[in-house]
Amino acid sequence: MQKKNVRGMEEIVKYQLVLASASPRRREILSQAGLEYIVRPSDFDERSIGAGAAPEEYVRALSRGKAAEVYRKMAGEPGASDGSAPSVLVLGADTVVAHRGRLLNKPRDRADAAEMLGRLQGDSHEVYTGVALCRRGEDGREELRSLAVKTEVYFYPMTREEIERYLDCGEYADKAGAYAIQGRFAAYIREIRGDYYNVVGLPISAVVQELKALGAWPL
Amino acid sequence: MQKKNVRGMEEIVKYQLVLASASPRRREILSQAGLEYIVRPSDFDERSIGAGAAPEEYVRALSRGKAAEVYRKMAGEPGASDGSAPSVLVLGADTVVAHRGRLLNKPRDRADAAEMLGRLQGDSHEVYTGVALCRRGEDGREELRSLAVKTEVYFYPMTREEIERYLDCGEYADKAGAYAIQGRFAAYIREIRGDYYNVVGLPISAVVQELKALGAWPL
């Protein structure tokens, strides 16, 4: 945001970026891109979003819920509105995998992961990440913007033995779709179409474009 | 390679993978995918390849030159042919960036890097990596296979100030095209079409498919 200050010069509002996610992958991506941030994981109840929504709408709704929840918590903290601290800009994000119209979340266990990779091998699927940014708008009210980014991912065919060997490394746990593109599974990814970091968990270049649109880049 | 042994059973030949490159990025990609290897950088003279070749042919020729040079060096070492050690499989690789028909190599200096990024911003370009695998064939002679993998990369538009700020981080040195997709430059990459790791320097999934075709997977 650029405003005229008392001398009529343009002034850049400095923001404190707040990541409303406990994901170590999202932290790594922000750090890699050189962004400074603090972490305040959200307690947003994911079950409040209807599971029947289209993937784009589902991840946008979840990311909005996370960002707004953390923004409101911080706005209620002492010193939040004394004007001396940098403005808070809260980033919420959520990632899902969609295969032939079906959403794949994190696997329940190894058998569930084997079933997911059995479906995904030799085929393409989509990864959607929703990103929401929440700040105090010019009118003093909460301002919430969100977007969803899609990346298509193509897997090589895998034998049952290759799937079992991959599962042995344990990487599948805690990953939507049961694989980590940034880990050993790189061996089986033929091609992607879209942003690689979106598959890891945060479409960093789209986030930077959004920060530019908000006048908040460089942070 | 599967051969019948004296009992008529199929036997998997175990290979020692040898990376004929000093690139730390290629080492990291092989390690990430769980491959074990040793490093023997090549002394192949890159100037022996005509610069007028098409990008695919140029990187294939360079990767073949590197793999064959290291294979021959190792074949001449004592103990190389006593049959007790695992067979050697040498991997050579080379990466170039092509923009509107022009090859971009590593920048000479910061000014050259600024000029490259000025060309690439807001546009698409292609990254080509050639990979060659060299081993002792069934007839006892050197067997050399190679392939080239292309990834299209799309950059967001960048201001002159953004380019200068990126150059400040120093990452451009030693990178074809003056950027590192796996570093801070992730902030400006809108999309890729192809293998991400091909842009980093080694198309790991294509390498694994080639190892499978050679009967050398899992290593």
Image: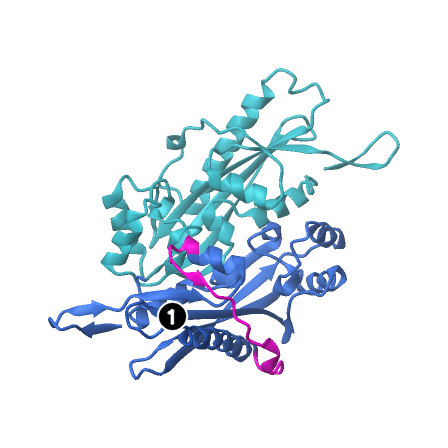
Chain colours: A blue, B cyan
Residue B3: x, y in percent? 78, 35
Residue B38: x, y in percent? 58, 31
Number of marks in the rendered image: 1
Question: Is residue B61 placed above or below A177 in the rendered structure?
Answer: above
Any part of residue A128 in sight: no
Residue at 26% over, 49% down = B114
User: In the displayed image of the protein, which residue is found farthest to the front?
Assistant: A78
Any part of residue B218 in sight: yes
Query: Chain ID for label 1?
Result: A
Residue at 62% over, 83% down = A52
- Quadrant in which the C terminus of chain B is drawn: top right
The majority secondary structure of the magenta stretch comes to loop
Q: From the viewer's side, name the closer residue of B178 and B138.
A: B178
Residue A204: x, y in percent? 43, 62
**Residue B163 as seen in the image, left or right of residue B54:** left
**Residue B31 as seen in the image, left or right of residue B9:** left
Q: From the viewer's side, name the closer residue of B187 and B115.
A: B187
Residue at 26% over, 40% down = B109
Q: From the viewer's side, name the closer residue of A162 and B62.
A: A162
**Disc 1 designates what residue?**
A89
Category of crowding for the residue at label 1, using alpha-carbon neighbours closer than 10 angstroms: few (below 14), some (14–19), many (at least 20): many
Give the image quarter of residue A82. bottom left
**Label 1's element?**
strand
Asked if the magenta segment contains residue A209, the reply would be no
